[in-house]
Amino acid sequence: MKINSIDIDNNKKSIALFFLLLITSLAPFSMATSFHDSQRLIATLVITIILIIRLVADTIFSKETLRFIFTILAWGAYVSTQSLAYEWSLVEVSLFFSVSLTILVIFKTPSLWLLTKLALIFTAIQLVYIVADYINYALTLAISEKLNVWEIIDGFSNIRFYAQFLSWTLPFLIGFVSTQEKPNFQKFITAIIILSWTLALVSGTRAFILGMTFSLLSVFIITPNLWRRYATWTLLTGLAGIIGYIMLVLILPNVFGLDNNAALNSTIDRDFTNSSGRIRIWIDTLNVAMSHPYTGIGPMMTAMEGILGKVAHPHNFLLQLMAEWGIPFTVGFMALTIYLSLKWRKLISENPAEREILALPVTAAISSAIAAGLVDGVMVMPVSLLYMTIIFGFGAALWRAWTPQVQRFRLPIELSSLLLIPVLSLAIITTIQWINIAQSNQGLSSAFTPRFWLNGKISQDNEFLNPTQTKRHNVVLR
């Protein structure tokens, strides 16, 4: 593998990827329906575009890879037949299938050049959010009487979603910049990292801190030779972020005479021992899983009204899998995760001088998001899923490059076309739902859309393709 070569074709693809992610960030501001719903639509279309392009190219698969993606599809289809609302379950199965397939095919040849491009893309996208958020902050200082962090952080329908996004991108960037001796754009990337740290702390999202802490442990285990660098950069940029938080929340509001009680209550004055109802949610989810141990209640069904009270997902992706996909599937998923983690570490250790540099950003990002996903909904939001796909995709490309002994082959065009059926179905359904919700003018007031849609609940008595319309008969829970 050529680490430092410049691939012009990959350069063009990187530019295209940047604009797709930029559209995902900016387009929802001008779209007709809710911001979150529009993010979902665009993220789905981006994944669809990537898959269509890659599957008609020279994408190769191993037998094990094909078994994996078809297992997801087959088991998902089966448990959907046991679901409380099979249409919504099939939507989530199609989503999981699309994400898994995209991870496997998005990048063909990994390199330090491609890693650098991804780091610059993530940095540029975060700059967009940073500019918007700090403009909001400046306007708040100028014209408001109170400092409310919910009015500062923009670009997401919930400020916690921004911190979830950072759980993927920030450790990736820290991992990248910490391994480069004299990286281009080092000052620029470092500044973005510090400003992002500040906004993450301003958001008051505890899951982000948990994720960053776990990433330190994971990097120590998997890429030990670079752990000191990663830990140093994480702690120094985090300290700078704390200073930024003090400036934004404590010092400047006092200088400009703003009431900062609301901001303090959302951050350092929070009761950090309070689970915010999560323990009750986790117990309820576990009870659901125990009541339906083999096949669960169906993918996406913890979002069904009457299952988990007011919340639309368990804030723990493992419990969510247990309740929705069944305990056997979850056990298999956990076993596969452990095996892949150990194999990943072994592959890196075979040539640490070359491989740790490439693996560190991926390892840091994935471990951070996994830890955050145990207490938050980091795995179920559209923007988080999109960046998860990209980061996992780079890791999958590294895996292929480091396992040349595995036999891989190109799929016939007929089979590739069959793989696109769930993908295109998801895109079509998502588009139809978005159009119908937009035409209903309900926007943010509609509560009848699924977990990673709008307000997050699935109504028992609303149409599937047009969630604003009522069915003639209610779904009977069983």
Image (cartoon, rainbow, N blue to C red):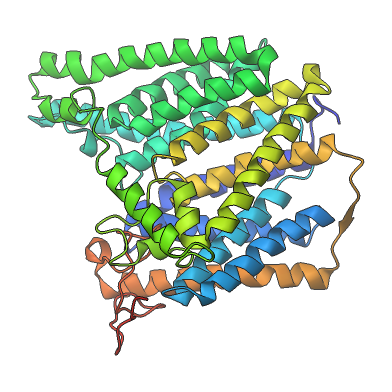
Residue 62 appears in the rendering: no
> Which residue occupies the foreground of this view, 77 or 369?
77
Could you tell whether 286 is left or right of 422 in the image?
left
Which quarter of the figure has residue 342? top right
Q: Where does residue 476 sit, x and y in percent of width and height?
A: 33, 80
**Which residue: 39% across, 12% down?**
240
Residue 96 appears in the rendering: yes
Q: Where does residue 167 sit, x and y in percent of width and height?
A: 46, 33
Which quarter of the figure has residue 462? bottom left
- The tally of labels here is 0
Residue 269, above or below 450: above
Residue 9, above or below 347: below
Could you tell whether 296 is left or right of 112 in the image?
left
Could you tell whether 425 is left or right of 266 in the image?
right
Q: Where does residue 126 sit, x and y in percent of width and height?
A: 46, 33
> Which residue occupies the foreground of this view, 226 or 423?
226
